Image: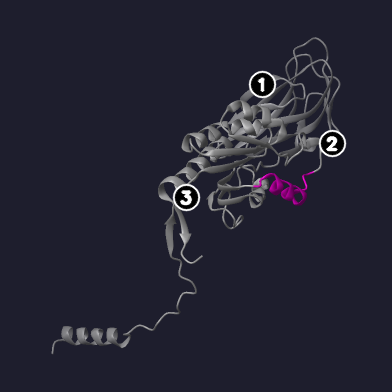
Amino acid sequence: MSCAMTWARRQRMDDLAGWPPAPRDPPGHTRIERRRSVAVHRVLVLKLDHLGDFILGLPALERLRVHFPQAHITLVCGSWNVPAAAGLRLFDQVIAFDAFAANPAQAPPPDRDRLLPQLRDLLDQSYDLAIDLRVDDDTRPYLTAVLARVRCGIGTRSRFDFLDVFLPIDATRAQTPPPAVLLAHLFHSANGCVDHGYMKQCTEAPAGPAVLVFGPYLQIPTGRFCFSPYLEVLQGGVAFEVLVDDQPISAGVASGGAIDFVNLTPGGHFQFRLLASAMAEPTTFRFYGGSLLREPVSDVLHQSEYLMLLVELVAMRVRSSGLLVEIGA
């Protein structure tokens, strides 16, 4: 017998030695789903936010009426939005419910445990479809006060297990990085500008153009930035320059207001300069540093687009593809 045949027989015997395979542990649960169609005759929409957010939601509200032209649509909104909502002629009924104060800056946070029963008393009917049309998730629990066959909103099932149709959202969309606080000791002084450590003080600046304060040579990424100098101009005028890798990208007269600029150099070194003005009047100022804020970079959608997508998803699920429901659940 050839070596090749001997090797083949051994290989075959090795294969058979492991046969049949050991049974695996049975799965704890097998999920079997089917599609469930939903006839939509009554729709409830929660739009509980303020006027600006209400306006941003108008395209989504219009699309909702387009998708369900024959349905009876009830809108629940803040009392401040009732006149505008009634004027749209998109809804068969408009109910006022204040989940927030008219001016949140002058009121404590709403007591949702107290408000939920009030909303439940207002909504004494059942609905085929209930949608919370707000991007922020603080109003999502109000859907639990609605007797509805299908509840819809932005979020995830793991967070809101009562949602039948949900649109996940980027959780980082509203996160803004804190500004970098650049105190005066990070900057340098020259040409008669006195360094007090916590402050640069100029009382006898030269008449002609001259650099008085410069620094801090901070390495920054590309993007849009806003630098707010902590500056007191007591007399005369002082000019400023913003540079990246010693290349000027912004200049003007410093007043203490915010200075916007764009950095296109990856890893470039940010520098802020104060310069003596060519004005005849002598320059007098105090400089305490400043704060540098990078505008957030985001690939997420605008909130009006999220709301439009939610409406389109709801329409697709209940009219075309149907809802996936677990058999036996």
- Give the residue pinned by disc 1: 251
Q: Quadrant of the N terminus?
A: bottom left
Residue at x 78%, y 14% (from the top left corner): 207
Amino acid residing under circle 3: Val
Give the answer, above or below, for where 315 lies relative to 196.
Answer: below
Amino acid residing under circle 2: Tyr
Helix, strand or loop status at disc 1: strand
Separation of marks 2 and 3 at Cα, in angstroms: 68 Å
Question: Disc number at residue 38?
Answer: 3
N-term mark: 2 or 3 = 3
Residue at the extreme bottom: 1
- Give the residue pinned by disc 2: 198
Tell me if residue 297 can be seen: no
Give the answer, above or below, for where 14 lies relative to 95.
Answer: below
Q: Residues within 10 Å of mark 1 (few under 14, many from 20)?
A: some
Q: Residues within 10 Å of mark 2 (few under 14, many from 20)?
A: few
